[in-house]
Image (cartoon, rainbow, N blue to C red):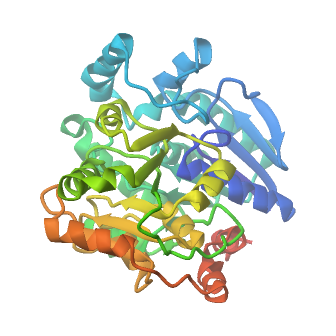
Amino acid sequence: MKILIVTAWYAPFIHPRAHRWVALAEHWAAEGHAVQVVTARLRGCPDESLLEGVEVHRVGFDSLKEVAYYYFSSHRARGRVGIQPQGPGRFGRIIAWLYTAFWKTIFFPDDACVWYFPARRRVLSLLRREQPDLLISVSLPFTGHLLGLAAKRHFPALRWLADIGDPFAYRVPPPNNTFLYGNINQRLEREVLEKSDAQRVTTTATLLKYREIFGEQSVRNMQVIPPLLKQNTVAPAASGILSEAETIRLGFFGALYAPIRTPDAFLDLLAQVFALQPEWQKRLQVHWYGEVFPEFYEKLSRFPNITLHGLRSREEVHTAMQDMDVLINIGNITDFQLPSKAVDYLASGKPVLNLSYTKFDPFADFFGDNNLIFNVKVVDGKLAPPDVLRWLRWLETPKLPPDSGALEERLAPFRTEAIGEAYLRGER
Protein backbone atom coordinates (compact mmCIF):
# COMPACT_ATOMS: atom_id res chain seq x y z
CA MET A 1 0.00 0.00 0.00
CA LYS A 2 0.85 3.68 -0.29
CA ILE A 3 0.21 5.33 3.06
CA LEU A 4 0.39 9.05 3.86
CA ILE A 5 0.47 9.96 7.58
CA VAL A 6 -0.23 13.54 8.69
CA THR A 7 0.99 14.23 12.21
CA ALA A 8 2.36 17.44 13.70
CA TRP A 9 4.73 15.47 15.96
CA TYR A 10 7.25 12.93 14.71
CA ALA A 11 10.75 11.76 15.66
CA PRO A 12 12.85 13.10 17.29
CA PHE A 13 10.00 14.92 19.07
CA ILE A 14 9.16 13.23 22.40
CA HIS A 15 5.42 12.69 22.78
CA PRO A 16 3.13 9.64 23.01
CA ARG A 17 1.63 10.37 19.58
CA ALA A 18 5.08 10.69 18.04
CA HIS A 19 6.23 7.42 19.62
CA ARG A 20 3.15 5.59 18.36
CA TRP A 21 3.32 6.82 14.79
CA VAL A 22 7.08 6.50 14.40
CA ALA A 23 6.80 2.85 15.45
CA LEU A 24 3.87 2.18 13.09
CA ALA A 25 5.35 4.05 10.12
CA GLU A 26 8.68 2.21 10.41
CA HIS A 27 6.92 -1.13 10.88
CA TRP A 28 4.80 -0.66 7.76
CA ALA A 29 7.83 0.47 5.76
CA ALA A 30 9.69 -2.67 6.87
CA GLU A 31 6.71 -4.73 5.66
CA GLY A 32 7.11 -3.24 2.18
CA HIS A 33 4.50 -0.47 2.24
CA ALA A 34 5.42 2.94 0.82
CA VAL A 35 5.05 5.24 3.82
CA GLN A 36 5.30 9.01 3.78
CA VAL A 37 4.85 11.40 6.70
CA VAL A 38 4.02 15.10 6.64
CA THR A 39 5.06 16.69 9.92
CA ALA A 40 6.33 19.97 11.36
CA ARG A 41 9.86 21.32 11.08
CA LEU A 42 12.36 20.95 13.92
CA ARG A 43 15.68 22.68 14.36
CA GLY A 44 18.49 20.33 13.39
CA CYS A 45 16.26 18.11 11.22
CA PRO A 46 16.36 18.26 7.39
CA ASP A 47 13.14 19.24 5.66
CA GLU A 48 13.27 16.06 3.57
CA SER A 49 14.71 12.80 4.85
CA LEU A 50 14.44 9.03 4.73
CA LEU A 51 14.20 7.58 8.25
CA GLU A 52 14.12 3.79 8.57
CA GLY A 53 12.44 3.50 5.18
CA VAL A 54 9.91 6.29 5.85
CA GLU A 55 9.90 9.43 3.68
CA VAL A 56 9.55 12.37 6.08
CA HIS A 57 8.47 15.81 4.83
CA ARG A 58 8.87 18.64 7.35
CA VAL A 59 6.98 21.84 6.58
CA GLY A 60 5.78 24.74 8.73
CA PHE A 61 5.77 24.73 12.53
CA ASP A 62 3.40 23.12 15.02
CA SER A 63 3.27 26.26 17.22
CA LEU A 64 4.60 29.78 17.54
CA LYS A 65 7.02 28.47 20.18
CA GLU A 66 8.58 26.19 17.59
CA VAL A 67 9.14 29.14 15.27
CA ALA A 68 11.17 30.84 18.01
CA TYR A 69 13.06 27.63 18.81
CA TYR A 70 13.91 27.08 15.15
CA TYR A 71 15.26 30.52 14.36
CA PHE A 72 16.74 31.59 17.68
CA SER A 73 17.53 28.90 20.22
CA SER A 74 16.33 25.48 21.31
CA HIS A 75 18.37 25.03 24.49
CA ARG A 76 15.16 25.11 26.55
CA ALA A 77 12.77 23.88 23.88
CA ARG A 78 9.83 21.60 24.58
CA GLY A 79 9.88 18.00 23.47
CA ARG A 80 13.69 17.67 23.37
CA VAL A 81 15.76 14.97 24.99
CA GLY A 82 18.19 16.12 27.66
CA ILE A 83 16.62 19.50 28.48
CA GLN A 84 17.00 19.85 32.25
CA PRO A 85 13.86 21.12 34.02
CA GLN A 86 14.25 24.56 35.58
CA GLY A 87 12.08 27.38 36.76
CA PRO A 88 10.98 30.12 34.35
CA GLY A 89 13.07 33.27 34.19
CA ARG A 90 11.64 36.77 33.95
CA PHE A 91 11.59 36.70 30.14
CA GLY A 92 9.96 33.28 30.18
CA ARG A 93 7.25 34.51 32.53
CA ILE A 94 6.52 37.46 30.25
CA ILE A 95 6.27 35.21 27.20
CA ALA A 96 4.02 32.78 29.09
CA TRP A 97 1.75 35.64 30.16
CA LEU A 98 1.53 36.99 26.61
CA TYR A 99 0.78 33.49 25.31
CA THR A 100 -2.04 33.00 27.82
CA ALA A 101 -3.46 36.51 27.72
CA PHE A 102 -3.43 37.00 23.96
CA TRP A 103 -2.48 34.14 21.66
CA LYS A 104 -4.38 31.45 23.60
CA THR A 105 -7.58 33.54 23.43
CA ILE A 106 -7.60 33.80 19.63
CA PHE A 107 -5.89 30.75 18.07
CA PHE A 108 -8.08 28.21 16.31
CA PRO A 109 -8.49 25.28 16.46
CA ASP A 110 -5.33 24.98 18.60
CA ASP A 111 -1.84 26.43 18.74
CA ALA A 112 -0.81 24.25 15.78
CA CYS A 113 -2.98 26.41 13.50
CA VAL A 114 0.19 28.04 12.12
CA TRP A 115 1.07 24.62 10.66
CA TYR A 116 -2.15 24.29 8.67
CA PHE A 117 -1.41 26.18 5.44
CA PRO A 118 2.16 24.95 4.73
CA ALA A 119 1.12 21.40 5.65
CA ARG A 120 -2.01 21.66 3.51
CA ARG A 121 0.05 22.63 0.46
CA ARG A 122 2.41 19.70 0.94
CA VAL A 123 -0.37 17.18 1.66
CA LEU A 124 -2.35 18.16 -1.45
CA SER A 125 0.82 18.08 -3.57
CA LEU A 126 1.67 14.57 -2.35
CA LEU A 127 -1.89 13.38 -2.92
CA ARG A 128 -1.79 14.56 -6.51
CA ARG A 129 1.67 13.15 -7.17
CA GLU A 130 1.68 9.90 -5.18
CA GLN A 131 -2.03 8.99 -5.14
CA PRO A 132 -1.82 7.09 -1.83
CA ASP A 133 -4.27 4.33 -0.95
CA LEU A 134 -4.76 5.62 2.58
CA LEU A 135 -4.47 8.97 4.35
CA ILE A 136 -4.12 8.87 8.15
CA SER A 137 -4.55 12.12 10.09
CA VAL A 138 -3.44 12.15 13.72
CA SER A 139 -4.57 14.19 16.70
CA LEU A 140 -3.67 15.84 18.84
CA PRO A 141 -3.37 18.53 17.67
CA PHE A 142 -6.78 18.70 16.01
CA THR A 143 -5.25 20.74 13.18
CA GLY A 144 -4.16 17.36 11.76
CA HIS A 145 -7.81 16.44 11.17
CA LEU A 146 -8.49 19.79 9.50
CA LEU A 147 -5.84 18.73 7.00
CA GLY A 148 -7.74 15.48 6.55
CA LEU A 149 -10.91 17.45 5.83
CA ALA A 150 -9.09 19.60 3.25
CA ALA A 151 -7.70 16.48 1.57
CA LYS A 152 -11.13 14.86 1.45
CA ARG A 153 -12.70 17.95 -0.14
CA HIS A 154 -10.13 17.91 -2.94
CA PHE A 155 -10.05 14.12 -3.33
CA PRO A 156 -13.51 12.75 -2.38
CA ALA A 157 -12.56 9.17 -3.32
CA LEU A 158 -9.56 9.20 -0.98
CA ARG A 159 -9.68 6.69 1.88
CA TRP A 160 -9.25 8.77 5.07
CA LEU A 161 -8.70 7.34 8.55
CA ALA A 162 -8.85 9.80 11.46
CA ASP A 163 -6.81 8.63 14.44
CA ILE A 164 -8.08 10.39 17.57
CA GLY A 165 -5.51 10.39 20.33
CA ASP A 166 -7.47 12.94 22.36
CA PRO A 167 -11.03 14.15 21.77
CA PHE A 168 -11.38 17.76 20.66
CA ALA A 169 -14.75 19.38 21.34
CA TYR A 170 -14.98 18.01 24.89
CA ARG A 171 -11.29 18.09 25.73
CA VAL A 172 -10.20 19.00 29.26
CA PRO A 173 -8.92 21.69 29.41
CA PRO A 174 -10.74 23.20 26.42
CA PRO A 175 -8.60 23.32 23.24
CA ASN A 176 -9.24 27.01 22.64
CA ASN A 177 -11.46 29.93 23.63
CA THR A 178 -14.79 28.11 23.86
CA PHE A 179 -16.65 31.44 24.28
CA LEU A 180 -15.63 32.24 20.71
CA TYR A 181 -15.34 28.78 19.22
CA GLY A 182 -17.41 26.34 21.30
CA ASN A 183 -20.10 25.77 18.67
CA ILE A 184 -17.53 25.66 15.87
CA ASN A 185 -15.55 23.04 17.79
CA GLN A 186 -18.59 20.79 17.95
CA ARG A 187 -19.44 21.32 14.29
CA LEU A 188 -15.91 20.63 13.09
CA GLU A 189 -15.48 17.48 15.13
CA ARG A 190 -18.83 16.21 13.90
CA GLU A 191 -17.71 16.93 10.33
CA VAL A 192 -14.52 14.92 10.86
CA LEU A 193 -16.58 11.99 12.14
CA GLU A 194 -18.97 12.24 9.17
CA LYS A 195 -16.43 12.85 6.38
CA SER A 196 -13.66 10.45 7.42
CA ASP A 197 -14.10 6.86 6.26
CA ALA A 198 -12.97 5.42 9.59
CA GLN A 199 -11.96 6.63 13.03
CA ARG A 200 -9.76 5.02 15.66
CA VAL A 201 -9.60 5.72 19.40
CA THR A 202 -7.61 4.04 22.16
CA THR A 203 -10.34 3.14 24.67
CA THR A 204 -13.91 1.89 24.63
CA ALA A 205 -14.78 4.65 27.10
CA THR A 206 -13.75 7.26 24.51
CA LEU A 207 -15.93 5.60 21.88
CA LEU A 208 -18.88 5.62 24.29
CA LYS A 209 -18.24 9.29 25.05
CA TYR A 210 -18.43 10.11 21.33
CA ARG A 211 -21.65 8.13 21.08
CA GLU A 212 -23.10 10.05 24.03
CA ILE A 213 -22.23 13.46 22.58
CA PHE A 214 -22.63 13.00 18.83
CA GLY A 215 -25.06 10.09 18.61
CA GLU A 216 -24.98 6.49 17.42
CA GLN A 217 -24.25 7.41 13.80
CA SER A 218 -21.05 9.18 14.80
CA VAL A 219 -19.39 5.93 15.91
CA ARG A 220 -20.57 3.62 13.15
CA ASN A 221 -17.05 3.56 11.66
CA MET A 222 -15.17 4.01 14.92
CA GLN A 223 -13.04 1.21 16.38
CA VAL A 224 -10.81 0.88 19.41
CA ILE A 225 -7.08 0.23 18.92
CA PRO A 226 -5.27 0.19 22.28
CA PRO A 227 -2.00 1.88 23.31
CA LEU A 228 1.21 0.59 21.80
CA LEU A 229 4.01 -1.05 23.77
CA LYS A 230 7.09 1.09 23.16
CA GLN A 231 9.61 -1.62 24.06
CA ASN A 232 9.42 -5.02 22.38
CA THR A 233 11.04 -6.87 25.27
CA VAL A 234 9.40 -7.89 28.52
CA ALA A 235 11.48 -6.83 31.47
CA PRO A 236 12.81 -9.33 34.03
CA ALA A 237 10.34 -9.85 36.84
CA ALA A 238 10.92 -7.76 39.94
CA SER A 239 10.97 -9.43 43.34
CA GLY A 240 8.90 -6.66 44.86
CA ILE A 241 10.53 -7.34 48.24
CA LEU A 242 11.71 -4.17 49.99
CA SER A 243 13.58 -4.50 53.27
CA GLU A 244 13.39 -1.93 56.07
CA ALA A 245 16.97 -0.83 55.52
CA GLU A 246 17.04 -0.06 51.84
CA THR A 247 16.16 3.08 49.95
CA ILE A 248 12.94 2.81 47.97
CA ARG A 249 13.03 4.37 44.52
CA LEU A 250 9.75 5.67 43.14
CA GLY A 251 9.60 6.54 39.45
CA PHE A 252 7.15 8.78 37.63
CA PHE A 253 7.25 8.69 33.82
CA GLY A 254 5.09 11.06 31.81
CA ALA A 255 3.79 14.61 31.70
CA LEU A 256 1.48 16.76 33.78
CA TYR A 257 -1.23 18.97 32.30
CA ALA A 258 -3.30 21.30 34.46
CA PRO A 259 -6.06 20.76 35.38
CA ILE A 260 -6.40 17.23 33.98
CA ARG A 261 -3.32 15.79 35.70
CA THR A 262 -1.39 17.55 38.49
CA PRO A 263 1.14 16.43 41.14
CA ASP A 264 -0.73 17.95 44.08
CA ALA A 265 -2.21 14.75 45.54
CA PHE A 266 1.08 12.88 45.23
CA LEU A 267 2.97 15.71 46.91
CA ASP A 268 0.33 15.70 49.67
CA LEU A 269 0.96 11.96 50.04
CA LEU A 270 4.68 12.58 50.56
CA ALA A 271 3.99 15.38 53.04
CA GLN A 272 1.66 13.15 55.05
CA VAL A 273 4.17 10.29 55.05
CA PHE A 274 6.98 12.54 56.32
CA ALA A 275 4.72 14.05 58.99
CA LEU A 276 3.48 10.66 60.22
CA GLN A 277 6.80 8.83 59.98
CA PRO A 278 9.75 11.22 59.53
CA GLU A 279 12.24 8.37 59.04
CA TRP A 280 10.77 7.83 55.56
CA GLN A 281 12.41 11.07 54.41
CA LYS A 282 15.70 9.15 54.28
CA ARG A 283 14.17 6.13 52.57
CA LEU A 284 12.05 7.49 49.72
CA GLN A 285 13.68 8.73 46.54
CA VAL A 286 11.42 9.99 43.77
CA HIS A 287 12.75 10.14 40.19
CA TRP A 288 10.65 12.27 37.84
CA TYR A 289 11.04 11.61 34.11
CA GLY A 290 9.26 13.84 31.62
CA GLU A 291 8.78 17.46 30.75
CA VAL A 292 8.00 19.68 33.74
CA PHE A 293 5.98 22.75 32.85
CA PRO A 294 6.69 26.01 34.76
CA GLU A 295 3.50 25.82 36.82
CA PHE A 296 4.70 22.55 38.38
CA TYR A 297 8.42 23.17 38.69
CA GLU A 298 8.38 25.04 42.00
CA LYS A 299 5.99 22.56 43.62
CA LEU A 300 8.14 19.58 42.70
CA SER A 301 11.49 21.21 43.42
CA ARG A 302 10.47 22.01 47.02
CA PHE A 303 10.90 18.34 47.90
CA PRO A 304 14.58 17.34 48.27
CA ASN A 305 13.49 13.72 47.77
CA ILE A 306 12.42 14.45 44.17
CA THR A 307 14.98 14.44 41.34
CA LEU A 308 13.80 15.95 38.06
CA HIS A 309 15.38 14.27 35.04
CA GLY A 310 13.42 15.92 32.21
CA LEU A 311 12.80 14.23 28.87
CA ARG A 312 14.99 11.25 28.05
CA SER A 313 15.23 8.86 25.13
CA ARG A 314 13.01 5.77 25.06
CA GLU A 315 16.01 3.55 25.71
CA GLU A 316 17.09 5.59 28.73
CA VAL A 317 13.54 5.64 30.08
CA HIS A 318 13.26 1.87 29.69
CA THR A 319 16.49 1.37 31.64
CA ALA A 320 15.46 3.87 34.32
CA MET A 321 12.09 2.16 34.71
CA GLN A 322 13.88 -1.08 35.52
CA ASP A 323 15.95 0.67 38.18
CA MET A 324 12.84 1.71 40.10
CA ASP A 325 11.26 -0.21 42.94
CA VAL A 326 7.78 1.25 42.40
CA LEU A 327 6.25 3.16 39.48
CA ILE A 328 3.83 6.06 39.96
CA ASN A 329 0.76 6.81 37.89
CA ILE A 330 -1.21 10.00 38.49
CA GLY A 331 -4.67 9.52 37.06
CA ASN A 332 -6.67 11.97 34.97
CA ILE A 333 -9.72 13.81 36.22
CA THR A 334 -11.49 12.43 33.13
CA ASP A 335 -12.75 8.85 32.99
CA PHE A 336 -12.35 8.00 29.30
CA GLN A 337 -8.62 8.28 28.53
CA LEU A 338 -5.93 5.68 29.17
CA PRO A 339 -2.32 6.92 29.39
CA SER A 340 -0.18 5.19 26.78
CA LYS A 341 2.38 4.40 29.48
CA ALA A 342 -0.07 1.95 31.07
CA VAL A 343 1.22 -0.78 28.75
CA ASP A 344 4.86 0.06 29.51
CA TYR A 345 4.14 -0.02 33.24
CA LEU A 346 2.52 -3.42 32.88
CA ALA A 347 5.45 -4.75 30.83
CA SER A 348 7.97 -3.53 33.40
CA GLY A 349 6.83 -6.14 35.94
CA LYS A 350 7.14 -3.46 38.64
CA PRO A 351 4.73 -2.60 41.48
CA VAL A 352 2.61 0.45 40.61
CA LEU A 353 1.06 3.15 42.79
CA ASN A 354 -2.03 4.52 41.03
CA LEU A 355 -3.69 7.72 42.27
CA SER A 356 -7.26 7.57 41.03
CA TYR A 357 -9.51 10.61 40.63
CA THR A 358 -12.61 9.10 39.05
CA LYS A 359 -15.23 6.49 39.91
CA PHE A 360 -14.29 4.55 36.78
CA ASP A 361 -10.53 4.68 36.32
CA PRO A 362 -9.31 3.40 32.91
CA PHE A 363 -5.80 2.81 34.31
CA ALA A 364 -7.06 0.68 37.20
CA ASP A 365 -9.43 -1.13 34.85
CA PHE A 366 -6.54 -1.90 32.51
CA PHE A 367 -4.52 -3.54 35.30
CA GLY A 368 -7.59 -5.40 36.63
CA ASP A 369 -6.81 -7.75 39.51
CA ASN A 370 -3.05 -7.54 38.99
CA ASN A 371 -1.47 -8.00 42.42
CA LEU A 372 1.27 -5.46 41.65
CA ILE A 373 -0.97 -2.38 41.57
CA PHE A 374 -2.02 -0.31 44.59
CA ASN A 375 -5.05 1.84 43.77
CA VAL A 376 -5.91 4.70 46.06
CA LYS A 377 -8.69 7.26 45.66
CA VAL A 378 -8.01 10.98 45.70
CA VAL A 379 -10.82 12.95 47.36
CA ASP A 380 -10.81 16.74 47.22
CA GLY A 381 -7.21 16.65 46.09
CA LYS A 382 -5.93 14.62 49.03
CA LEU A 383 -5.51 11.07 50.30
CA ALA A 384 -7.13 9.96 53.53
CA PRO A 385 -4.57 9.28 56.33
CA PRO A 386 -5.65 5.60 56.62
CA ASP A 387 -4.87 5.17 52.89
CA VAL A 388 -1.43 6.70 53.44
CA LEU A 389 -0.67 4.13 56.14
CA ARG A 390 -2.03 1.31 53.97
CA TRP A 391 0.31 2.40 51.20
CA LEU A 392 3.33 2.34 53.51
CA ARG A 393 2.44 -1.19 54.59
CA TRP A 394 1.98 -2.18 50.94
CA LEU A 395 5.42 -0.82 50.07
CA GLU A 396 7.11 -3.30 52.38
CA THR A 397 4.88 -6.26 51.63
CA PRO A 398 6.55 -8.98 49.48
CA LYS A 399 4.83 -9.24 46.11
CA LEU A 400 4.68 -12.14 43.70
CA PRO A 401 6.41 -11.31 40.41
CA PRO A 402 4.36 -11.72 37.22
CA ASP A 403 4.52 -14.98 35.32
CA SER A 404 6.59 -14.22 32.22
CA GLY A 405 4.53 -16.45 29.95
CA ALA A 406 1.24 -14.96 31.07
CA LEU A 407 2.69 -11.46 30.75
CA GLU A 408 3.86 -12.15 27.20
CA GLU A 409 0.37 -13.31 26.29
CA ARG A 410 -1.23 -10.30 27.96
CA LEU A 411 1.04 -7.89 26.05
CA ALA A 412 0.60 -9.47 22.61
CA PRO A 413 -2.29 -7.17 21.49
CA PHE A 414 -0.20 -4.08 22.30
CA ARG A 415 2.90 -4.91 20.27
CA THR A 416 3.69 -2.91 17.15
CA GLU A 417 2.92 -5.83 14.83
CA ALA A 418 -0.57 -6.31 16.32
CA ILE A 419 -1.37 -2.59 16.38
CA GLY A 420 -0.14 -2.15 12.80
CA GLU A 421 -2.27 -5.06 11.60
CA ALA A 422 -5.31 -3.68 13.42
CA TYR A 423 -5.02 -0.35 11.58
CA LEU A 424 -4.66 -1.91 8.14
CA ARG A 425 -7.19 -4.69 8.61
CA GLY A 426 -9.79 -4.16 5.89
CA GLU A 427 -7.79 -1.35 4.26
CA ARG A 428 -5.79 -3.52 1.83
Residue 13 drawn at (x, y percent): 61, 39
Q: Where on the picture, by quarter, is residue 384?
A: bottom left
Q: Is residue 121 above or below residue 148?
A: above
Q: Quadrant of the C terminus?
A: bottom right
Q: Nearer the viewer, residue 59 or 360?
A: 360
Q: Position of residue 120 (x, y in %)?
A: 59, 35
Q: Residue furthest front?
A: 245
Vertical relation: 280 (above or below) 356: above
How far across and down, in percent of the image, does residue 286 sit? 42, 50
**Location of residue 182 in the rendering, given as x and y in whole percent from the top left corner:** 24, 44
- Residue at 33%, 21% (x, y): give it: 96
Residue at image x 52%, y 39%? 309
Measuring 52% from the left and 23% from the top, which residue is drawn there? 76
Viewer-side residue, 382 vs 176: 382
Q: Do we see residue 170 in this rendering?
A: no
> Could you say which is closer to the camera, residue 411 or residue 160?
411
Q: Could you tell whether 20 is left or right of 241 in the image? A: right
User: Is residue 224 visible to the viewer in this orientation of the structure?
Assistant: yes
Q: Quadrant of residue 383?
A: bottom left
The answer to whether residue 92 is above or below residue 132 is above
Q: Nearer the viewer, residue 263 or 178?
A: 263
Q: Identify the image quadrant of the N terminus.
A: bottom right
